[in-house]
Image (cartoon, helix red, strand yellow):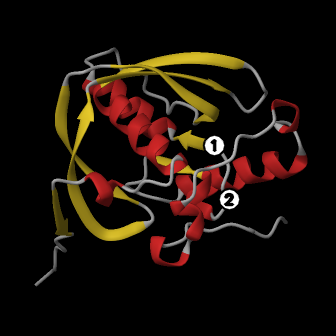
Amino acid sequence: MLVAMYSILPYTDNPALREKAKPIPVHRIDSPAIETLIKEMKQLLSREQYGVALAAPQVGESLRLFIVSGKALLKADENENKKQNESALPDVVYINPVVTKISHQRSNKHEGCLSIRGKWGVVPRAEKVTITAYDEHGKKFTRGASGFLAHIFQHEMDHLEGILYIDKATELYDEEHEYEN
């Protein structure tokens, strides 16, 4: 059995979150190291009840890679009033992503982060974004998004630039815990 090498690190103990992440050479995408990183990031993300995406810097790797969970894609589809597929969608890997289009129209989005537990904020985000990236097999693709998925793209792209949502938030607040009587 493979012993996990990675964990989601808190921002206070993770210098990679404040660095501009390095591109992954396309010929290294199918290397054992990158395959292991992707596999473990998917496992970490699957264990998070509220996590919708995870960037490599969040696990201490300063690489231009993030994963969007299938449950987030399903929620994005619901939010866009598309026909819901009853089965979960697969996670999608974005390697060396580049924003190719971004709308001028912005709205405030409620935001949290797996690297900053117990805090939430309000962040102005563009309503629409298009990204070009490589998948985990080295195939280049382009994906446009609006609403919730566009919001996720921008949050994860910020991680790859060494920016945290708390740097852009117009409001920050502590998570409210529900207590049983």
Q: Quadrant of residue 125?
A: top left
Residue situated in front as seen by the camera: 33 or 99: 99
The three-letter code of the residue at mark 2 reads Glu
**Label for residue 65?**
1
Residue situated in front as seen by the camera: 169 or 55: 169
Residue 140 image point, x, y percent: 69, 18
Label 2 Cα crowd, 10 Å radius (few <14 / some 14-19 / many 20+)? some
- Residue furthest to the bottom in view is 181
Quadrant in which the N terminus appears: bottom right
Is 128 placed above or below 73 here?
Answer: above
Q: Quadrant of residue 146?
A: top left
Residue drawn where x is 63% and y is 17% of the image: 141
Label 1 Cα crowd, 10 Å radius (few <14 / some 14-19 / many 20+)? many
The three-letter code of the residue at mark 1 reads Leu
Query: Is residue 158 shown left or right of residue 94?
Result: left
Residue 134 image point, x, y percent: 69, 26
Residue drawn where x is 55% and y is 28% of the image: 98
Residue 28 image point, x, y percent: 86, 38
- Provide the secondary structure element on which disc 2 rests: loop
Is 7 placed above or below 46 here?
Answer: below
Residue drawn where x is 54% and y is 47% of the image: 160
Q: Which residue is mark 2?
A: 61
Residue drawn where x is 16% and y is 33% of the image: 107
Residues marked 1 and 2 touching at CB (< 8 Å)? yes
